[in-house]
Image (cartoon, rainbow, N blue to C red):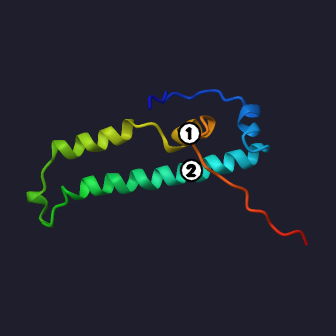
Amino acid sequence: MAINPSIVTRDLEKIAEKTGNLYESLHVVSQRAKQISSAQKEELNNKLSEFASTVDNLEEVFENKEQIEISKFYERMPKPTTLAMEEFMEGKVYFRKVETPEE
């Protein structure tokens, strides 16, 4: 999925129309962004853990080009909020309202 990493102006009415309320829509997007961020962080940590050194001696710590490239790749990725908003606007995010009993 090709996502423009630049800032994009959004039509608030189109965002609100998905749930009927702008704030609910933004809440859904923020929750999805948290999920994406958590998954990306876990994935990055798993990849970087392969390079983890068990040596505490600073003289033996060296620069690993693969590790740097992995980090740069993740830095260049679109932000989780951008990904979440794109998914939401394309109808790829499942959400539901929890009905509360009337008092």
Residue 15, how many percent across, how many down? Answer: 71, 36
Q: Is residue 70 left or right of residue 6?
A: left
According to the picture, the residue beneath numbered tag 1 turns out to be 87
Q: Residue sitting at 59 percent across and 34 percent down?
A: 90
Q: Nearer the N terminus, badge 2 or badge 1?
A: 2
Q: Residue sitting at 19 percent across and 60 percent down?
A: 52
Q: Is residue 54 above or below residue 6?
A: below
Type of amino acid under label 2: Arg
Residue 16, how many percent across, how many down? Answer: 75, 39
Quadrant position of residue 86: top right
Q: Quadrant of the N terminus?
A: top left
The 10 Å Cα crowd at callout 1, few under 14, some 14 to 19, many 20 or more, is some
28 or 75, nearer to the observer: 28
Q: Is residue 87 above or below residue 36?
A: above
* Element under disc 1: helix
Residue 72, how many percent across, how many down? Answer: 30, 39
Q: Are marks 2 and 1 in contact (CB under 8 Å)?
A: yes
Q: Is residue 55 above or below residue 93?
A: below
Quadrant position of residue 18: top right
Q: Residue sitting at 61 percent across and 39 percent down?
A: 91
The 10 Å Cα crowd at callout 2, few under 14, some 14 to 19, many 20 or more, is many
Q: Residue furthest left?
A: 60
Q: Residue sitting at 48 percent across and 50 percent down?
A: 36
1 or 69, nearer to the observer: 1
Q: Is residue 33 above or below residue 8?
A: below
Quadrant position of residue 101: bottom right
According to the picture, the residue beneath numbered tag 2 turns out to be 32
